[in-house]
Amino acid sequence: MPPTGTTTTGRKGRIAVTPRSLSGGGHPALRLLEDAGYDLVFPAPGAVPSEEQIRSSLSDCVGYLAGTEVLSGALLEELPNLRAISRNGVGVDSIDQEAAARLGISVVTAPGTNSQGVAELTIALMLASCRSIPWHDTQLKSGDWKRRQGREISGQVLGVIGCGQIGRRVASLALGLGMKVLAFDEYPLASFNPSPDFSWAPLETVLSASQIISLHMPPAGLPVLGAEAIGLLRDGAIVINTARASLIDDAAMLQGLDSGRVDTLATDVFSAEPPAPSKLISHPRVITTPHIGGYTRESVDRATEAAVENLLNALATSP
């Protein structure tokens, strides 16, 4: 069911669909929305919609299957018919939830549906960092036979900061590769103790004792890796971020890379997507991917099915 832009008003109303994984080529689960009596609107097929595209396309929508676009309170106030927003993931930091509650708009998420995809990308970025795979690929394709000595991941100490569903999957995969894992979480799950090579630890210990750091926390008021925290890292640490860009202070990270405190930063997330050019993104010791953590066939299927079901339930119970 390929998207064809906006449609005429549906039998029960209209639902906007904006996640890039769905708006570019559709998904069989979206048919359930049409079968339930709704017409679908695709404000920006295959792309992140602008605020103006959201405003104009959702002016008469009752439902919104949303991606990671920013939904401010001011924007939500301009959507008088909107009754429910369903995210095809777990993050809602881009949505003004206070305004949504005040306006009577339900906000529902699909937790856990992309955990495996994000965890596997995290491990892939660790391996790519340890063996400088993107750098070697670039050198060889440019005609240069150059080599950079790598490090084996087995035996390395991984620090997992934020050990929820994704963090625990990363820890389990890392243990399977022969790593030792230290984990910090504000609310540690005491029953999670998968191996003698796994242990819970205070944040300062995780930062100072780990050779590789992987971030899996929700957004915080201040970056988790600011100048002080980066100063605690072991020389030559590798940092992986598949969670939120706001967890890292970009200026402090750039300084850490230049000084050698951080050997490599691998990130799948950015404060604006697509990001503007920057010294950090173009740094030779930075590996970037365009927010593909949950962009696997399996994750998209799970997330879409959950988001559709959640949206139908929210619309059925909203005033």
Image: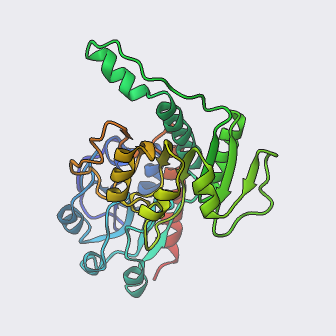
Q: Nearer the viewer, residue 195 or 233?
A: 233
Against 163, residue 131 (above or below) is above
Please give the name of the residue rendered at 42% of the width and 68% of the height, measured from the top-left corner.
93
> Which quadrant is home to the C terminus?
bottom left
Q: Is residue 311 left or right of residue 123?
A: left
Q: Position of residue 253 (x, y in %)?
A: 38, 53
Against 107, residue 98 (above or below) is below
Q: Position of residue 50 (x, y in %)?
A: 21, 60
Please give the name of the residue rendered at 37% of the width and 76% of the height, measured from the top-left corner.
96
Q: How many marks?
A: 0
Q: Nearer the viewer, residue 45 or 29?
A: 45
Rendered image quadrant of residue 69: bottom left
Q: Is residue 166 visible?
A: no
Please give the name of the residue rendered at 37% of the width and 67% of the height, measured from the top-left corner.
94
Please give the name of the residue rendered at 21% of the width and 51% of the height, measured from the top-left corner.
276
> Which quadrant is home to the N terminus?
top left
Rendered image quadrant of residue 263: top left
Q: Is residue 105 visible?
A: yes
Q: Position of residue 166 (x, y in %)?
A: 60, 52
Against 180, residue 192 (above or below) is below
Colour style of the rendered protein structure: rainbow
Which residue appears farthest toward the bottom when viewing the image? 102
